[in-house]
Amino acid sequence: MTRVAAIDCGTNSIRLLVADITAPDGASGAGAAGELVDLDRRMRIVRLGQGVDSTGRLAPEALERTFEACREYAAVIKEYGAERIRFVATSASRDAENRDEFVRGVLDILGVEPEVITGDQEAEFSFTGATRELPGRDGCLVVDIGGGSTEFVVGDDRVRAARSVDIGCVRLTERHLVRDGVVSDPPTAAQIAAIRADIDAALDLAERTVPLREPRTLVGLAGSVTTVAAIALGLSAYDSTAIHRSRISRATVREITERLLAATHDERAAIPVMHPGRVDVIGAGALVLLAIMERTGAEEVVVSEHDILDGIAWHAALDDA
């Protein structure tokens, strides 16, 4: 058994998982069977990617919010005595000119250097985390809708094709819905059409690499998907146990997406399961999910609470073991 700490630092949120991972005797590598037991799992909305799409730089206030979360996580990791720490940074820090400042800050606080991974690596970790526990993984398409990018992975017991494209709930919101620092509330039909055009172009790009229409099962990850699922399930409070492995129909996703895009900020904020950090970006995230379901022909999405964070933990425990 190995006790690991995995940190996933994305465009919108930073998340921590401390877990005990056990692999069967003689097994190694992220494709082997085994068991992951959560000890602590938490998230903070830090919006690291604030303004990166337009400025190309990480904002000082975004860096400070992220470093504050890192200091909290360092205390948790010390409390549990994790043997290995792996910190993975994704879309926002890939794109930023001043990412060295980010790397130095994380190293000073946590004692490990963040890995600014490629989109393909991000896709592999997401696939491992999402599908390792699923029975019959043959023919899965995993989509991880993040703040700055979306990953598409097709595989079975291994990744067969993967692609990351620059569509995410924060990036699309900032690109099309923010004027003079204010989010359109609700967006106009023209703004929604512009977002959809960007999504469709990105899906065309992804489809050059990943056979989006081939897999039998669509698995959806990350906050936009789980929030849509929580709304669909009519939950009065966010319940990861109820959300995990739920199946949401395309018709339901369409109805929720249309409702979110027509709602005001206050109406979205009043939804019981809505995290405050997702109020302004959930409409764009839901639209990405709907567009993917329409492109692939998927009648439903299987929602997974296990995602890139779990994949990072598996790789931390088993890579080079």
Image (cartoon, rainbow, N blue to C red):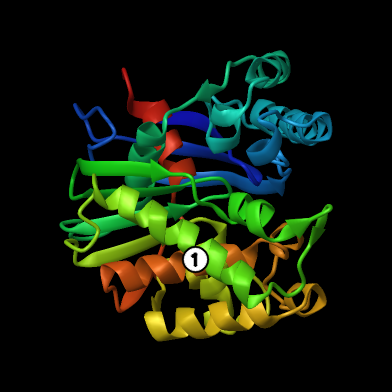
Give the residue displayed 58% in from the left and 16% down from the top: 113
Residue 88 lies, with reference to residue 296, above or below; the image says above
Residue tagged 1: 196
In this rendered view, identify the residue nearer to me: 103 or 130: 103
Quadrant of residue 40 in the image?
Answer: top right
Identify the amino acid type marked 1: Arg
User: Could you say where residue 44 lies in the image, as x and y percent from the top left?
Assistant: 71, 46
Q: How many marks?
A: 1
In this rendered view, identify the residue nearer to me: 231 or 283: 283
Using a 10 Å C-alpha cutoff, classify the residue at mark 1 as few (fewer than 14 neighbours), some (14 to 19) or many (20 or more): some
State whether residue 240 appears in this view.
no
Quadrant of residue 299 in the image?
Answer: bottom left
Residue 291 lies, with reference to residue 319, above or below; the image says below
State whether residue 26 appears in this view.
yes
Give the residue displayed 61% in from the left and 49% down from the top: 171
Q: Quadrant of the N terminus?
A: top left
